[in-house]
Image (spheres, coloured by chain):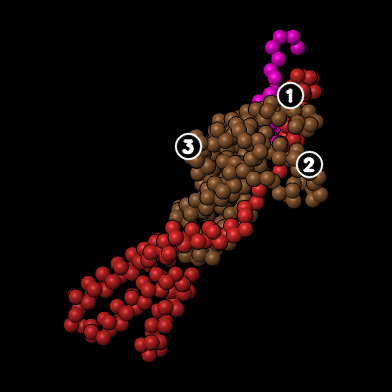
Chain colours: A brown, B red
Amino acid sequence: MAPDPDAALMVAFQEGNEAAFRTLFERYGRATMAFCNRFVRDPARAEELAQDVFLKLHRSADRYQPSARFTTFLYRIATNHCLNEVRRGEYQALAEVDPKSQDGAPLDPDALPGTSATPEEVARGNALARDVAAMLSRLPESQRAAFVLARFEGLPYEEIAEVLGTTVPSVKSLVHRATVSAARALEPWSAGGAAS
Amino acid sequence: MIGRVRHVDDDLTALLDGALPGDRRAEVEIHLSSCPECRSERDRIARALSALSLTPPPPAPPPGFEQRFYARLAREAPRHRSLLDRLAAHPFRWLVPSTGLAALLVAGIWIRHADDRSELEMARHLDLLENYVEVASLGVVETSEDVDVVFHLDELREGRP
């Protein structure tokens, strides 16, 4: 396995180098917020959760073993934190309502694939994101975590198993069941993307 | 084959994700070549994955994202990790118990041979031990050569060759 430069930064932080920690935050803070947003669909809360994750990382740095990839360690903290958050229940209602507030804010057209998205494409992107978020909110939590890690974070099954503390066959099953649910929920989009 | 057909639904997502081992992948593909039902299910999952890939990313954080975190970090994290925490994480943390043991040993020898040891020499040994502890706690010892440097610096300070 190639040396993990992030692991080296984490070790430097363990030895007292605060700048190394800041580098890690600058590298992964925004991605962590995006990850958290998949669970809570509220950018302000997602930012708080991402901050919580890095504060936990700051406090528990001594528990990090360089044998594990840094991102695996980070995803483990973030996943547990987000699942604890959604267990509180207040996000269930949000998932079913408020069609105008996908993630609580209009999407940035510049963030859509292609730089010259038309207003129609932006609207379709928002609608798709809303349907995906609603579908996610209905998944059981372990399926949801596995699905987000596989589909949006692009982690291989082996790494998802490490993050969730389970086996690869279990991850395969979780991802499959969640994907079948997604296929059912996104049928209108799959059939030609004309959902509106 | 007439009778029960073993469908491969459970493997279709892993197949599309490229996560099936080679031998299982071959079995699934052979089955797909003769099972329209499983092919249809595979295509349905593939279309869903394709739709998912068009999902826009979540909104970017508002400006000041890093600054807000650093401000919170300054409020909530200990400003400085304690000396004990830093020592516990240091690669030369073994120096602490080692120097403690060495100090006990030297003290024992000093007590037994107080008559043979000048007070000045004893103070020099204790100084040296103190230097090791201090340097280890500062976190500047990276290699065993650094430890040697501490020893020789002490010799230089004492004006010894």
**Is B43 part of what is drawn in magenta?**
no
Q: Is residue B56 visible?
A: yes
Residue topped by disc 3: A88
- Is residue A102 toward the left or the right of residue A53 in the image? right
Q: Residue A188 at x, y = what percent?
A: 75, 28
- Is residue A146 toward the left or the right of residue B41 in the image? left
**Label 1 to label 3: alpha-carbon separation:** 35 Å
Q: Residues within 10 Å of mark 1 (few under 14, many from 20)?
A: some
Q: Which label's residue is closer to the chain start, 2 or 3?
A: 3
Residue at position x 54%, y 46% in the image: A45
Kind of residue sitting beneath label 2: Glu
The label nearer to you, 1 versus 2, is: 2
Residue topped by disc 2: A121
Residue at position x 54%, y 65% in the image: A19
Q: Residue A50 at x, y = what percent?
A: 54, 50
Disc number placed over residue A8 in the picture, else none: none
**In the image, which residues are magenta?**
B1-21
Kind of residue sitting beneath label 3: Arg
On what subunit does the disc labeled 1 rest? B
- Is residue A57 toward the left or the right of residue A117 in the image? left
Chief SS of the magenta region:
loop
Residue at position x 33%, y 75% in the image: B129
Q: Residue A76 at x, y = what percent?
A: 53, 45
- Is residue A23 toward the left or the right of residue A15 in the image? right
